Image (cartoon, rainbow, N blue to C red):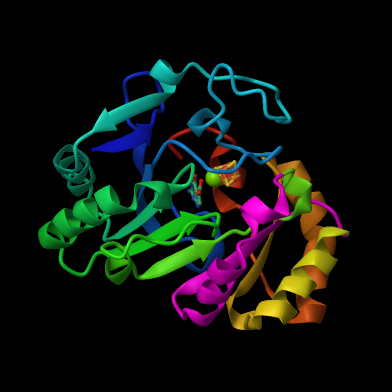
Amino acid sequence: MLTLATTTPGEPEIFASLQGEGPSLGRPSLFVRLSRCNLACRWCDTAYTWRFTGDNRPHRDDTAFERSANQLTLSEQDVAARLLAFPQDRLVITGGEPLLQGAALARLVTLLKAGRPGLHVEIETNGSVAPHASLDPLVDQYNVSPKLAHSGNPADLALIPERLSAWAQDPRAFFKFVVANPEDLAEIEALEALYAIPGERLFVMPEGIDSQTLRTRSRWLSDAALTRQWRFTDRLHIHLYGDTRGT
Ligand SMILES: Nc1nc2[nH]cc(C(=O)O)c2c(=O)[nH]1
Ligand code: SF4
Ligand SMILES: [Mg+2]
């Protein structure tokens, strides 16, 4: 069984969209959003996957979500059938933190690759959880977003040395650091040096859930990427659709 996020109560967050972030930006893709996360970022744009009633960890909006309206449990077969009803040949698995459900995801991806040979599978992860051994060989690309101090997570939960070192050595893993302030850059430089992350696989992305914020931050962040030989990614889906579920 898989625990998914919902778009509207009762409807799983399964949709087709252009990949809005990272190395596959602009590619037509299927998305499935899983519920639950092991971290709690202050600026999380999908707090409805984890900040349920009674969870008082700090968050920008201070909103708590009713679990029953925002979570849905479906079988791997059901999720596979819903995804295979779309024509796209790329899948983005996101969350929440999808790797918390790695064994069930392996069963899902096995069904999907049987139904659509050649399906490209990428996973959006916060980078703190190891992929389940049965899932890892089925994954084509990881978009790894380690959480910096401004996320509000304790570093010992968010930045796991063995994990960061494994991602840095995996050619399938692209780092995507969410940046809000120029002070965040020194932290990225330190991680780049410590784990020897190749610039080719290091993206910076402005934090923001509206076009104006993204544009303002892109102005200095793109310069920072240029001088450090990092890659830059915008958040295309925010410009196109705004901060809405199912897009
Ligand atoms: N279009 C689109 N691209 C995305 N890339 C990463 C997303 C995410 O929420 O993880 C996302 C998303 O929610 N929508
Ligand atoms: S790791 Fe991702 S899903 Fe989890 S709280 Fe942070 S931004 Fe939200
Ligand atoms: Mg998102």
The answer to whether 229 is drawn above or below residue 244 in the figure is below
Write down the quadrant of residue 201 in the picture.
bottom right
Q: Is residue 43 magenta?
A: no
The structure residue drawn at horizontal position 85% and vertical position 62%, both measured from the top left corner, is 220
Question: Ligand 2, what quadrant?
Answer: top right
Give yes or no for residue 181 being in the magenta stretch. Answer: yes
Point out residue 232 in the picture as x, y percentages from the top left corner.
67, 68
| Location of residue 57 in the rendering, given as x and y in whole percent from the top left corner | 68, 29
Q: Answer above or below: position of 92 versus 190.
A: above
Q: Is residue 194 left or right of residue 16?
A: right
Q: Is residue 147 visible?
A: no
Q: Is residue 238 left or right of residue 187?
A: left
- Find the magenta span and give its range: 153-182
Q: 162 above or below 234?
A: below
Q: Nearer the viewer, residue 6 or 99?
A: 99
Q: Quadrant of the N terminus?
A: top left
Query: Which residue is farthest left?
Result: 114
218 w.r.t. 191: above or below:
above
Q: At which x and y percent is residue 169? A: 52, 81
* Residue sitting at x 41%, y 52%: 99
| Residue 165, x across and y down, in percent | 57, 75
Q: Is residue 101 visible?
A: yes
Horizontal side, residue 77 vs residue 86: left or right: left
